[in-house]
Image (spheres, grey):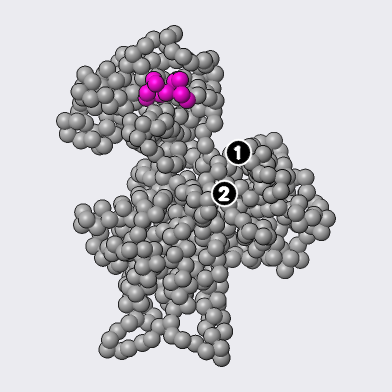
């Protein structure tokens, strides 16, 4: 079983990202489980959501303590939240930032991948909604889902022109990672 | 075809398939999303139910009772304080023998206020003549709605039923489910054929005044109906398996499910979603060659005493791990299990672990500690265990409690 923890702020779409990722993983034929950190969500407050992936049915209902992958939507969280907590040594942390991995205030033995998902989102959507781009980066780095499955879920979720532009953002992040 | 969805969507889908006539709704976290999703279905014309926005949970239950008395199939959902407010009319629904189906997104009770889950809300309704189902995963939460209708509306039963799923842990998780097809549900769940209905051309009184010379017998009759529902649940679960190809404890009348329990020396008994995590811990012990298993009641009322007696037979120790505490004694499930074992002449020692109150995570480490505790008392005579030592909290953060309160 592989476990993913997503860090963001209330309003950035942390829960939506967990939901879309788990759907995209399910589309590839694997079992997936997505869930938010349950609580009172406030705009701007640090929020977490989780995804589990396995080849067989997942019945684990406990929290994720030792993720294989961590996704950080907002780089300003690095100084506030212990985003690398429990991350496996052979795991990967994917951070949305314009900076290089050496410039980040983070201490982990896991591999650090940076992607400027906000810039990609600005280019395709004209707004800093970086979720779909970040999902493209995730698919490339982890191989847990693919562009086709993500594309289907993004189109199902947003539809129309917004859907197409989000798919482009996802694909560009996939290519640059 | 399997789909991925959240728990509240799965419950709403199941309700839609069962097609209630009347749905009174009042919001409460974390149940709200269930009735919100249903309201969308009604607004979009996918569901033709009469959706009634009421002003309280008391009114939600009362409206459901009124509709049920008129012969309608009803649905509502609630939890926690909302279920407390429904408690008074729900006891009456059982007394009047009116079938209702409710989804309960199990949540703790104030004070202090907490929106997170445990089983204290439904356990406090134990004595009211409501059938109580507990789901381990989303598929079961969905399936229990159909089974609850089938049993609650059975002419020999005609009682309210609570279909419980852990608040947040199940209501807000997203995973795969296999929704009912129209053909399957039509085959499994007949239209409601009420025993008595309010009809102006043939007036009836329901829930009338009873004097001491009659009241005891009316209670006895309701009690017998709750007990009789065991057979009906068994039959419903059997037919459900035939039609939907999903099985729930057929060996135990659809009331109890077991996991690697047959030759187990140590048995964990638990309800609901925590059983999913427990399966992994059982596997860990089995991999090490240790005979650990799990017994999961799917139904808490009627209490499956015979089925549990059979499932627990042969164990050397039992740990009842529950998200409930009957303040002043022990957890409700442990109390019932020990009562059953006594009547059965059993000498198996039973520990009662209180876990996961108000959403506290129950980790695999917590469950390992429960297994280790049960291993220590293996083969002991229950009379060697002190009452206070039987009751354990996993974990209890003693540093938060003043010495005077310990």
| Residue A24 percent coordinates (x, y) | 34, 33
Residue B52, labelled with which disc? none
Say if B280 sits above or below B166 in the image.
Answer: above
Secondary-structure class at tag 1 = helix
Choose top left, top right, bottom left or bottom right for residue B6.
Answer: top left
What residue is disc 2 on? B357
In the depicted view, which residue is nearer to us: B88 or B228?
B88
Q: Is residue B173 left or right of residue B22?
A: right
Visible in this render: residue B103?
no
Dot 2 or dot 1: first in sequence order is 2
| Residue A168 percent coordinates (x, y) | 23, 23
Query: In the rendered structure, which segment of residues is drawn in magenta?
Result: A72-81
- Please, which residue is most extreme toward the bottom here? B213
What residue is disc 1 on? B364
* Circle 1 chain: B
Say if A29 sits above or below B138 in the image.
Answer: above
| Residue B195 percent coordinates (x, y) | 39, 80
In the depicted view, which residue is nearer to us: B363 or A10?
A10
Say if B334 sits above or below B2 in the image.
Answer: below
């Amino acid at each position: 079983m592989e476990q993913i923890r997503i860090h963001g702020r209330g309003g950035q779409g942390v829960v939506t990202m967990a939901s879309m990722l788990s759907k995209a993983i399910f589309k590839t034929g694997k079992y997936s489980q997505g869930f938010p950190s349950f609580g009172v969500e406030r705009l701007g407050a640090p929020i977490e959501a989780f995804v589990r992936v396995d080849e067989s049915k997942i019945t684990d209902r406990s929290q994720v303590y030792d993720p294989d992958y961590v996704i950080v939507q907002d780089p300003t969280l690095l100084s506030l939240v212990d985003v690398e907590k429990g991350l496996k040594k052979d795991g990967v942390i994917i951070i949305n930032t314009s900076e290089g991995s050496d410039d980040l205030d983070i201490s982990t033995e896991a591999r650090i991948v940076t992607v400027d998902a906000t810039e990609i989102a600005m280019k395709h959507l004209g707004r800093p909604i970086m979720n779909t781009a970040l999902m493209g980066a995730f698919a490339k780095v982890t191989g847990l889902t693919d562009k086709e499955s993500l594309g289907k879920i993004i189109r199902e979720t947003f539809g129309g022109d917004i859907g197409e532009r989000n798919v482009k953002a996802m694909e560009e992040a996939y290519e640059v990672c | 075809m399997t789909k991925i969805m959240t728990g509240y969507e799965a419950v709403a889908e199941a309700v839609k398939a069962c097609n209630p006539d009347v749905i009174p709704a009042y919001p409460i976290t974390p149940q709200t999303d269930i009735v919100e999703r249903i309201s969308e279905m009604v607004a979009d014309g996918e569901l033709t139910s009469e959706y009634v926005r009421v002003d309280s949970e008391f009114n939600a239950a009362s409206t459901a009772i009124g509709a049920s008395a008129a012969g309608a199939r009803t649905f509502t959902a609630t939890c926690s304080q909302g279920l407390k407010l429904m408690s008074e009319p729900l006891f009456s629904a059982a007394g009047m023998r009116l079938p209702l189906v409710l989804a309960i997104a199990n949540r703790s009770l104030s004070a202090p206020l907490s929106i997170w889950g445990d089983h204290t809300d439904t356990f406090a309704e134990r004595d009211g003549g409501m059938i109580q189902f507990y789901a381990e995963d989303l598929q079961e939460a969905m399936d229990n709605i159909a089974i609850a209708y089938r049993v609650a509306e059975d002419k020999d039963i005609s009682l309210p039923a609570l279909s419980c799923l852990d608040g947040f842990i199940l209501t807000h998780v997203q995973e795969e489910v296999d929704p009912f097809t129209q053909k399957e549900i039509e085959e499994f769940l007949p239209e409601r054929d009420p025993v008595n209905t309010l009809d102006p051309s043939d007036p009836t009184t329901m829930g009338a005044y009873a004097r001491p010379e009659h009241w005891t017998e009316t209670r006895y009759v309701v009690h017998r109906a709750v007990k009789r529902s065991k057979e009906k649940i068994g039959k419903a679960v059997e037919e459900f398996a035939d039609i939907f190809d999903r099985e729930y404890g057929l060996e135990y009348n659809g009331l109890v499910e077991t996991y690697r329990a047959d030759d187990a020396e140590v048995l964990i008994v638990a309800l609901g979603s925590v059983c999913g995590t427990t399966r992994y811990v059982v596997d860990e012990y089995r991999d090490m060659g240790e005979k650990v298993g799990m017994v999961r009641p799917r139904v808490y009322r009627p209490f499956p005493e015979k089925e549990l007696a059979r499932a627990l037979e042969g164990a050397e120790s039992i740990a009842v791990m529950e998200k409930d505490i009957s303040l002043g004694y022990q957890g409700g499930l442990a109390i019932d299990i020990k009562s059953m074992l006594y009547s059965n002449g059993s000498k198996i020692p039973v520990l009662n672990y209180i876990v996961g109150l108000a959403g506290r995570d129950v980790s695999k480490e917590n469950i390992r500690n429960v297994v280790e505790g049960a291993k220590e008392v293996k083969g002991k005579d229950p009379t060697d265990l002190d009452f206070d030592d039987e009751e354990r909290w996993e974990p209890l953060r003693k540093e938060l409690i003043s010495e005077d309160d310990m």
